[in-house]
Amino acid sequence: MPVFPVEALTRLPTLLTEIAPDDWPSLPGAPSGRFRIEADIGPDGRVMHVNLLCEQEMREVAAAYAGTIMGWRFTPAEILGHQVSSRIHIEFEIGSPESEGFTATPVPLQAPPRQ
């Protein structure tokens, strides 16, 4: 099944799953840093596959977050009124373990600039 990048879509996928702070995994002692997760969303709005896009030291953290993302549901993307599979990137920034705790904020879904 082809997966379309956001720049090919006429309607972006929209997250339906409500995310509460307690939904994120608790990872005491995890390193702080940034990582991205690439998620393929099917024409039914389910996450079909995730790919970790991060440095080696963040892989364990990213894998835990990917497990959460696999349960998310979306309004599927469309191309000219037809529901299609799509691929999005979600960025996370994990705070220092000494700070107020772990937080993650998905970057809003945006089409990359056209070249």
Image (cartoon, rainbow, N blue to C red):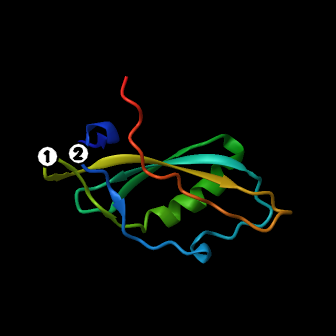
| Distance between mark 2 and mark 1 Cα atoms | 6 Å
**Residue type beneath disc 2:** Thr
Residue toward you, 97 or 12:
12
What is the quadrant of residue 53 in the picture?
A: top right
Q: Measured from the top left, where is residue 65 in percent x and y?
A: 57, 61
* Contact? badges 2 and 1 (CB < 8 Å): yes
Q: Is label 1 in a helix, a strand or a loop? A: loop
Residue at the spot x=66%, y=52% of the render?
Answer: 93
Give the tally of numbered discs: 2
Q: Quadrant of the C terminus?
A: top left
66 shown above or below 6: below
What is the quadrant of residue 20 in the picture?
A: bottom right
Left or right relative to 87: residue 9? left
**Residue type beneath disc 1:** Leu
For residue 10, the mark is: 2
Q: Is label 2 in a helix, a strand or a loop? A: loop
For residue 11, the mark is: none
19 shown above or below 50: below
The residue singled out by tag 1 in the image is 80
Left or right relative to 106: residue 80? left
Q: Measured from the top left, where is residue 34 in percent x and y?
A: 66, 47
Question: For the residue carrying disc 2, how many other residues have a C-alpha within 10 Å: few (<14), some (14-19), or many (20+)?
Answer: few
Q: Earlier in the sequence, mark 2 or mark 1?
A: 2
